Image: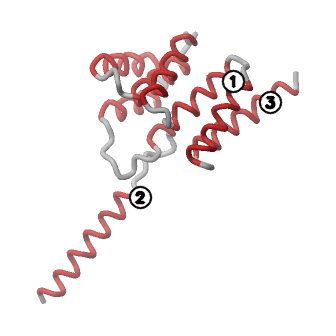
């Protein structure tokens, strides 16, 4: 009986760990790759604001987080994202924070993707393609790569129709 209980415990542990590994962050690119880590509560709160398109609330939250953790690449990346998505984005500030995220973590996939998208907003296809190439080197054909590739293709199609 002890042996059966031991097997049941092992099965329960394996099932729970499999569920934890499969519990993704949804479709949001900032949550990808965090399946086996505890999610930062600031990032989780920012994600809720992003989902509600509360760009001002997300900016305020992340600005406060950056004041306490200025070396956090994720905070810089998401702060720039919140600014870029909001009304009348200050693109100088957007580029400053994406570049700071990459200074802190040169392999930050989300920052490369979003910086490429920001370059497209500025109609700088060459720089967007540089970040696509960087993503290709860093992660092969990951989600960030495919999302930036699609954004570039959409941009090129829109330009061709003008």
Give the residue at the far right of this rendering: 161
- Packing grade of label 3 (10 A; few <14, some 14-19, many >=20) is some
State the mark number for residue 102. Answer: none
State the mark number for residue 120. Answer: 1
- Packing grade of label 1 (10 A; few <14, some 14-19, many >=20) is many
Q: Is residue 70 left or right of residue 99?
A: left
Q: Element type at marker 1?
A: helix
- The relative height of residue 64 versus residue 141 in the rendered view (above or below) is above
**Residue 150, quarter of the rendered image:** top right
- Residue at the location (60% across, 40% down)? 135
Q: Of marks 1 and 3, which one's residue comes earlier in the chain?
A: 1
Q: Is residue 135 left or right of residue 19?
A: right
In percent of width and height, residue 22 lies at: 41, 58
- Packing grade of label 2 (10 A; few <14, some 14-19, many >=20) is few
Q: Are marks 1 and 2 in contact (CB under 8 Å)?
A: no
Mark 1 or 2: the one toward you: 1
- Mark 1 vs mark 2, CA separation in Å: 33 Å
- Residue at the location (49% across, 25% down)? 53
Q: Element type at marker 3?
A: helix
Give the residue at the far bottom of this rendering: 1
Q: Quadrant of the N terminus?
A: bottom left
- Residue at the location (24% across, 75% down)? 10
Q: Are marks 2 and 3 in contact (CB under 8 Å)?
A: no
User: Which residue position holds label 2?
Assistant: 22
In percent of width and height, residue 74 lies at: 41, 31
- The relative height of residue 11 versus residue 69 in the rendered view (above or below) is below
In percent of width and height, residue 24 lies at: 43, 50
- The relative height of residue 37 versus residue 43 in the rendered view (above or below) is below
Q: Element type at marker 2?
A: helix
- The relative height of residue 155 versus residue 22 in the rendered view (above or below) is above
Query: How did the renderer colour the structure?
Result: secondary structure
């Amino acid at each position: 009986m002890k042996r059966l209980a031991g097997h049941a415990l092992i099965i329960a542990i394996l099932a729970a760990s499999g569920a934890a590994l499969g519990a993704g962050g949804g479709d949001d690119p900032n949550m990808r790759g965090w399946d086996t880590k505890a999610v930062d509560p600031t990032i989780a709160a920012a994600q809720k604001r992003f989902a509600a398109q509360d760009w001002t609330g997300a900016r305020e939250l992340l600005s406060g987080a950056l004041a306490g953790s200025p070396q956090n690449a994720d905070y810089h990346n998401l702060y720039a994202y919140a600014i870029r998505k909001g009304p009348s984005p200050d693109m100088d500030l957007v580029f400053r924070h994406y570049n700071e995220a990459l200074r802190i973590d040169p392999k930050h996939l989300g920052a490369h993707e979003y910086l490429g998208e920001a370059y497209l907003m500025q109609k700088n296809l060459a720089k967007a393609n540089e970040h696509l190439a960087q993503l290709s080197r860093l992660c092969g054909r990951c989600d960030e790569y495919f999302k930036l590739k699609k954004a570039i293709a959409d941009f090129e199609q829109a330009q061709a129709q003008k």
